[in-house]
Amino acid sequence: MDDQKIMTLKECRLHIHEVLSEIYPKTEIDSFFFLMIEEELNLQRIDTVLSPDFLITQENLTTLKNIIRRLQNEEPIQYILKKTTFYGLPFIVNENTLIPRPETEELVAWIIEEVTKRTQQKNQKLSILDIGTGTGCIPISLAKNIPTSNVSGIDISQKALDIAKKNALLNDTEIRFFEMDILNTEYLPQQFDIMVSNPPYVRELEKTAIKKNVLQNEPHLALFVEDNNPLLFYKKIADLAKKYLNKNGILFFEINQYLGQETVKMLEKKGFTNIELRKDLFGNYRMIQCNINL
């Protein structure tokens, strides 16, 4: 590929599989290829069937070659292309933000489902807070799907908030963002009807199970907690929720799949009720919702 000045779409696809087959499964390589041709050649998956002899220019080949090199170094395709999709919406991502996961889409869907049930007969303006907002994927998706909501997001990283603000503009949503270290605050901007967080929850002991492309590229500040206090963020956020959730308000968490029961017990001790632990599509305990008696 380095020496070729031109290549067909079919040849390019075969080459990518040849180069990356020892690192990634076939289905993932295909997904890379389709993302690359859409981004760089403005082609769709169907074009690989309809136009396999489409000629890729030398300029485009050079760009594709650079992407492949970065994939060989196990850099996430989302960081290479600087974008991803979450809950059907486009998002900018970079090394300062976690790449949004499908499991978090399920959390967003659950929140929308609960809000719809509770407000379908009322034109209630809901206040929502996302803690540890990263790309802003949770508050932006909620704002787009719950028109009667007033949404805010908090993060410790100003660089992450810069991306979140760009994503809010990209998706034509109004979100209030605050730079805040949640572990070292006793105050929130206002009272809220819904509080949600997907905080750091991967224990250091679980690092061996984390893929190399995540370990080497995604921000550890947003991923890991110490083994001896894995619920550190959950405890703090629960304490703040007791003070800042409105009557009948709901607290939602994405959680460590191995710490579901521990998280439930912690919330019970802090006085939360109607605690519901839910599995994700992969069969792992991944989400919790609960209320506080006021």
Image (cartoon, rainbow, N blue to C red):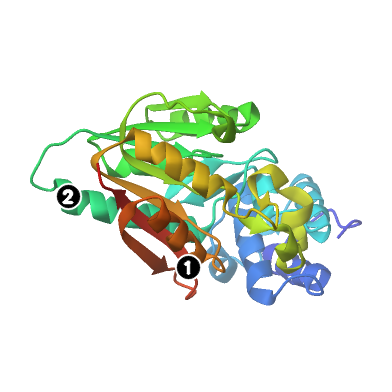
| Quadrant assignment, res 205 | bottom right
Q: Quadrant of the N terminus?
A: bottom right
Q: Residue at x 39, y 51 (%)?
A: 252
Residue drawn at 36 percent across, 48 percent down = 251
Residue 144 placement (x, y as % from top left): 33, 40
The C terminus appears in which quarter of the rendering? top left
Q: Closer to the camera, 236 or 44?
A: 236
Q: SS for tag 1?
A: helix
The quadrant where residue 176 appears: top left
Q: Amino acid at mark 2?
A: Arg
Instruction: Give left or right: position of 215 versus 141.
Output: right
Q: For the residues marked 2 and 1, what is the alpha-carbon distance in whole angstroms?
A: 27 Å
Q: Position of residue 199 (x, y in %)?
A: 55, 47
Q: Amino acid at mark 1?
A: Gln
Mark 1, Cα crowd under 10 Å, few <14 / some 14-19 / many 20+, is few
Q: Residue 212, relative to residue 78: is it above or below?
A: below
Q: Residue at x 15, y 45 (%)?
A: 119
Q: Which badge, 2 or 1, is on the more N-terminal residue?
A: 2
* 136 in relation to 289, above or below: above
- Residue highlighted by disc 1: 261
Residue at 71% over, 47% down:
220
